[in-house]
Image: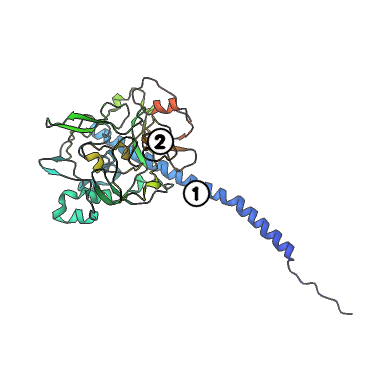
Amino acid sequence: MEVKKRRLAFTLVELLVVIAIIGVLAGLLLPAVQAAREAARRSQCQNNVRNIMLATLNFEGSYKGLPMGAEFGVGTAWTSLILPQMEQDSLYQVLTFQEDSNGNYQWGLTVPGIPGNTARTNPAFAFFRNIWVMEQKVPSFRCPSSIFPAEAADISGDNWIIQRRTPINYLGCVSGVLKDDRRPQNVKTPSGSIGNVEVISDLDGVFIQRINHQRIRRNSQSDGFTGATLASITDGTSNTIAIGECEPDTNVVALMGITRENSASNFGRKDHWPFGSDDVDTTGQGDMSEHLGSTGVPMNLRPVAAGTAAFAEYELSFGSKHRGGANFAFCDGSVRYLDENIDNVIYSRLGSRNSGQIVTVPE
């Protein structure tokens, strides 16, 4: 009698069950993997904020004041001033911070522009070497969770272009109450003339300007470098935000390089950049939100269309692509992750250095 041997194999039903189990396990594992990756990105972002704040405090130790926020009428931004403290002295030495009888060093070039390396190496374009710096990538200035392109063309309100401008994900805090980044005023320049420029010398944040429409020099001088001092932070350094995360709006990329900035309130773009800006340089423009933010508006505001009533607040808002909040550096050097649902009054006071209303920072 012949004995039939049983074949060792899966039935179709068994195979489908195994595949279903694997699919369920993969579905359970994938969110955990994504969460672990985001936790690593958030940790790296915290390190970026910490390094920028450490450089800022080292700058304060050298100049006895925190970096000014932006030099309206000239173009310099606070991130340029701390480059030596961030081990980026090679970029710092290329930059020129002046616009006077010795030169008119620009932060953009008339459309259609030229590549930044040409501006740096061609003697005919010596006054445009700042463009080259604005196209360089400093890793500590970018959050690894950001979805904004690594570079983008951008035309200022004065119709001057940077072809490959590099964005930033960290802003200096200029105020705890400001809701509009356009504050043009006719003020006297150091030379005695009158110019229509943004004024931030009277604001309550950390990254302000020491005097209106100032002119700064780097070589052997520090005139105008500083804004607020640590002594002026009467609410306490551990209770005052210095630097916060920001996320430029990817919806504006399609317009960059085609449409120039509109300098009116509730117009423009939610674009954030390091080093300097032609909009900050140009009289009658401004756009401080390219470099500065405010806790006077809520965190992680949803995108709104330019020209709507809420756009000015949207431009100034801090925020991130992390879940439910953003990283902030305080003036004592600490870095904390603040929940996007933080009480608006507490959040506002944390952005002011001298509100007189000291609050406890939420854990």
Residue 198 image point, x, y percent: 25, 33
Instruction: Write the residue at 77% across / 72% down.
Output: 7
Q: Point out residue 112 in the picture as x, y percentages from the top left corner.
A: 24, 54
Q: Residue 340: where, in percent of width, then height?
A: 47, 34
Residue 127 placement (x, y as % from top left)? 16, 48
Label 2 close to label 1 by CB (< 8 Å) = no
> What label sits on residue 154 in the rendered view?
none
**Which residue is the extreme one toward the top?**
356
Rendered view: 306 above or below 154: above
Tell me if residue 34 comes above or below residue 211 in the rendering. Answer: below
Q: Secondary structure at mark 1?
A: helix
- The disc at residue 328 is 2
Question: Toward the viewer: 210 or 281?
Answer: 281
User: What kind of residue is marked 1?
Assistant: Arg
Q: Which of pointers 2 and 1 lies earlier in the amino acid sequence?
A: 1
Residue at 21% x, 40% y is: 282
The kind of residue tagged 2 is Phe
Q: Which residue is mark 1?
A: 37
